[in-house]
């Protein structure tokens, strides 16, 4: 009799941490100060490793190395097509080491391994390959101007790009930042988030293995107010690409004023997810669950304000609660786990304080609302019903597994309420009526609108915010403009 082979339920244990130093000018080194900081496993609250803690002195070394690599050496001499080849080689290495990189991401961030493997890493690889294809396609125009002149434009690399990223999608943020910058011919100084430096450092090793010349990619882990601020102020850095909170972006904008740096920001949100009564209800419920609870609710575009048409409100909430309760919390290395811990104590505390504020304001907590387990930063999937627009849980970005349901009656009303926020990152609408769908798509002030879906990302589709959700766009051809300067050349033909 044949025996069924059981699928392993837990992927092999934590991966080896291979790299904990700074990458400057092609070499791994300690911080000048000799200082280190600890990175923790959010599922166990145990220390994983000590990481070299960069500050202004290290940023200075890295910025000078990036400047030198931009102006001399192999990088500026390289054909654009060969830059594309290097990006493809890095994508090949990411594919080869997919399991290790996914496990590092899960170890450091706490996200379920099934997500790191099925979402983060494939998106990383796709992003690198997409921009590899762009490297030799950055063209200018020929422009007919008055008089006997030949006028044309060139797209030239912007120079040294300072890149500051958050902890929610550590490696994906590396790919979103590195790939367009390198395709355009820039050099990089990256500061990963202090909570999650591991996958970025391992990627630095793979970038050297792929053959990127020394100084093209520099990595300086450290804290925001020290390493991050020094990067923003450094005169050798031409631009800052930042993803994080809008309050940090406000500080960065001030710090960048002295050197008039180019800035691109991808910031937070309080995205409306609008469900009409004529929607495919089960699909809308599943999309709503995914749109908020994916990645433990730690997505800048999380659909945290769920507007539900009154006629279906009760049925929608009861189905949503069932799905929220069915989420499986636990060891993120267990392949059946669908929700891991929040990234750290600070986020955990902030989310629980918002749950308190929801209760105090009189919203009805219909499921969750508490810590899960005794160890690790786990929070139960939480749904608040009967939320009103003025409650803190409806106005503030929580960045955790807390969803607010807000009933509505009319389309005009929901458009006004959806736009009643300082944010404008994303929105979604669920309906079978194409007229309504496009009316919402055209009226909601947000950089991305999903119709009958949520969180559909592609390297080719631009992503970014209206209002206080950002400046500029990531991904697609749009991101290349963040890393190039336009030059006009005019020649006298007389
Ligand atoms: P989060 O709350 O998600 O950690 P932040 O905006 O605080 O969001 O952090 C995102 C990134 O910005 C991190 O890499 C962090 O170290 C960095 N950062 C924080 N403060 C500053 C600052 N003053 N200048 C530059 N970077 C900063």
Image (cartoon, grey):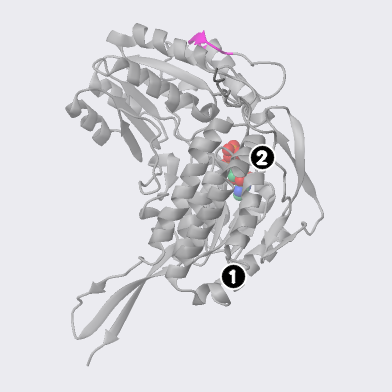
Task: Describe residue 482's horizontal placement relative to residue 222 as left or right.
Answer: left
Q: Position of residue 8 (x, y in %)?
A: 61, 27
Looking at the image, tell me whether mark 1 or mark 2 is earlier in sequence order. Answer: 1
Residue placed under numbered mark 2 in the picture: 195
| Relative depth, front residue between 280 and 434 | 280
Task: Indicate the quadrant where residue 454 lies.
Answer: top left
Q: Is the CB of mark 2 within 8 Å of ligand 1?
A: yes
Q: Which residue is drawn at the image coordinates 57% and 77% (left, top)?
A: 72
Image x and y of residue 71, in percent: 55, 75
In the image, residue 2 lies at what x, y percent?
Answer: 54, 20
- Comparing 402 with 316, the one in front is 316
Indicate the secondary structure of the residue bearing disc 2: loop
Name, please, the residue furthest toward the right: 34
Residue 120: x percent and y percent? 51, 40
Residue in the picture at 54% in, 37% down: 117
Q: Is residue 218 above or below residue 35?
A: below
The segment highlighted magenta reads: 361-369
What residue would you read off at disc 1?
67
């Amino acid at each position: 009799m044949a025996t069924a082979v059981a699928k392993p339920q837990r992927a092999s244990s934590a991966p080896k941490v291979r790299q904990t130093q700074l990458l400057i000018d092609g070499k791994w080194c300690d911080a000048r100060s000799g200082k280190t900081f600890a990175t923790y496993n959010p599922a166990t609250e145990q220390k994983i490793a000590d990481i070299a803690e960069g500050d202004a002195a290290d940023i200075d070394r890295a910025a000078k190395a990036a400047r030198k690599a931009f102006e001399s050496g192999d990088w500026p001499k390289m054909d654009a097509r060969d830059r594309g080849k290097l990006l493809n080689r890095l994508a090949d290495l990411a594919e080869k080491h997919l399991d290790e990189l996914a496990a590092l991401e899960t170890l450091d961030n706490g996200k379920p391994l099934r997500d790191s493997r099925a979402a983060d890493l494939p998106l990383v690889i796709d992003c690198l390959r997409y921009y590899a294809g762009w490297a030799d396609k950055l063209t200018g125009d020929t422009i007919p101007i008055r008089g006997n002149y030949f006028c044309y434009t060139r797209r030239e690399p912007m120079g040294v790009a300072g890149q500051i990223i958050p902890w929610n999608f550590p490696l994906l943020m590396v790919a979103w930042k590195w790939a367009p910058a390198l395709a355009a011919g820039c050099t990089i100084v990256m500061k990963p988030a202090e909570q999650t430096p591991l996958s970025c450092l391992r990627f630095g090793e793979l970038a050297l293995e792929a053959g990127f010349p020394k100084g093209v990619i520099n990595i300086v882990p450290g804290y925001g107010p020290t390493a991050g601020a020094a990067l923003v102020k450094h005169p050798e850095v031409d631009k800052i690409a930042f993803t994080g909170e809008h309050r940090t972006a406000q500080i960065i904008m001030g710090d960048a004023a002295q050197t008039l740096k180019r800035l691109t920001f991808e910031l937070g949100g309080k995205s409306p997810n609008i469900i009409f009564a004529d929607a495919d209800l089960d699909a809308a419920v599943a999309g709503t669950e995914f749109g908020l609870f994916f990645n433990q609710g730690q997505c800048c575009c999380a659909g945290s304000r769920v507007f539900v048409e009154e006629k279906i409100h009760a049925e929608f909430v009861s189905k949503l609660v069932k799905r929220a309760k069915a989420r499986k919390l636990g060891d993120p290395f267990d392949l059946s786990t669908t929700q891991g811990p929040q990234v750290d104590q600070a986020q955990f505390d902030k989310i629980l304080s918002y749950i308190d504020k929801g209760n105090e304001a009189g919203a009805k907590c219909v499921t969750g609302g508490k810590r899960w387990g005794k160890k690790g930063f786990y929070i139960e999937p939480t749904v608040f019903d009967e939320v009103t627009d003025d409650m803190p849980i409806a106005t503030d970005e929580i960045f955790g597994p807390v969803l607010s349901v807000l009933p509505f009656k009319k389309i005009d009303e929901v458009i006004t309420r959806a736009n009643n926020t300082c944010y404008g990152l994303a929105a979604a609408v669920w309906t079978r009526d194409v007229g309504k769908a496009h009316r919402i798509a055209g009226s909601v002030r947000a950089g991305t609108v999903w119709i009958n879906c949520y969180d559909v990302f592609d390297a080719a589709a631009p992503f970014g915010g209206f209002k206080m959700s950002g400046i500029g766009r990531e991904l697609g051809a749009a991101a290349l403009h963040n890393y190039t300067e336009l030059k006009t050349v005019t020649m006298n033909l007389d």
